[in-house]
Image (cartoon, rainbow, N blue to C red):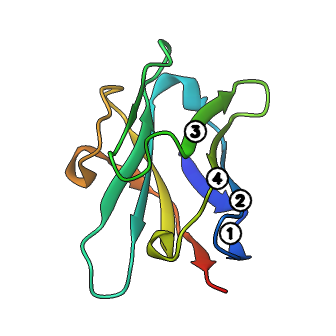
Amino acid sequence: QLQPVESGGGSVQPGGSLKLSCAASGNPLDDYAIGWFRQAPGAEREGVACIRGRVDITYYSESVLGRFTISRDTAKNTVYLQMSNLAPEDTAAYYCAADLSGNGGLHPSSYDIWGQGTQVTVSS
């Protein structure tokens, strides 16, 4: 059974960078679309980036385009989210999720299996 596990969250000053990891045992992540989502207190869960299975087509929300990069390491069965030029509004719990159909996108309802999340806090 596929189970993604996030890591790499933490506290950083505005303008700083963090790299989140989404690792999984069992099924290869290549078979699926993997999305990164975030949820701030009192807000809805927001899709920020997605990488589709096999073809490595990527999608980004407008709020992170040019600052965040999603990538895949097949050998490590891990998907990464490199976040740069972080701002306080990026503060949230970040989740990775797998869409078993492989189609992906940025809407949470498209995803089937979710990790437990990792907290990112951006403040001075």
Task: Give the numbered dot on residue 18.
Answer: 2
Which secondary structure, mark 4? loop
Residue at (60%, 77%) from the top-left corner? Answer: 122
Q: Nearer the viewer, mark 4 or mark 3?
A: 4
Q: CA distance from mark 4 to mark 2?
A: 7 Å
Q: Nearer the viewer, mark 4 or mark 2?
A: 4
Q: Is tag 2's residue or tag 3's residue first in the polypeptide sequence?
A: 2
Residue 20: which quarter of the image? bottom right
Type of amino acid at the residue the image marks with label 3: Thr
Q: Is residue 60 left or right of residue 124?
A: left
Observer-nearest of 18 and 96 = 18
Q: Position of residue 77 (x, y in %)?
A: 70, 34
Q: Vertical placement of 98 versus 87: above or below?
A: above
Q: Is tag 4's residue or tag 1's residue first in the polypeptide sequence?
A: 1
Residue at (54%, 69%) from the top-left corner? Answer: 87
Residue with the mark numbered 4: 84
Which secondary structure, mark 2? strand
Q: Is residue 79 left or right of residue 111?
A: right
Residue at (57%, 52%) from the top-left corner? Answer: 4
Q: Position of residue 108 (x, y in %)?
A: 27, 53
Type of amino acid at the residue the image marks with label 1: Gly
Q: Looking at the image, do the residues carrying marks 4 and 3 touch, with CB atoms under 8 Å apart?
A: yes
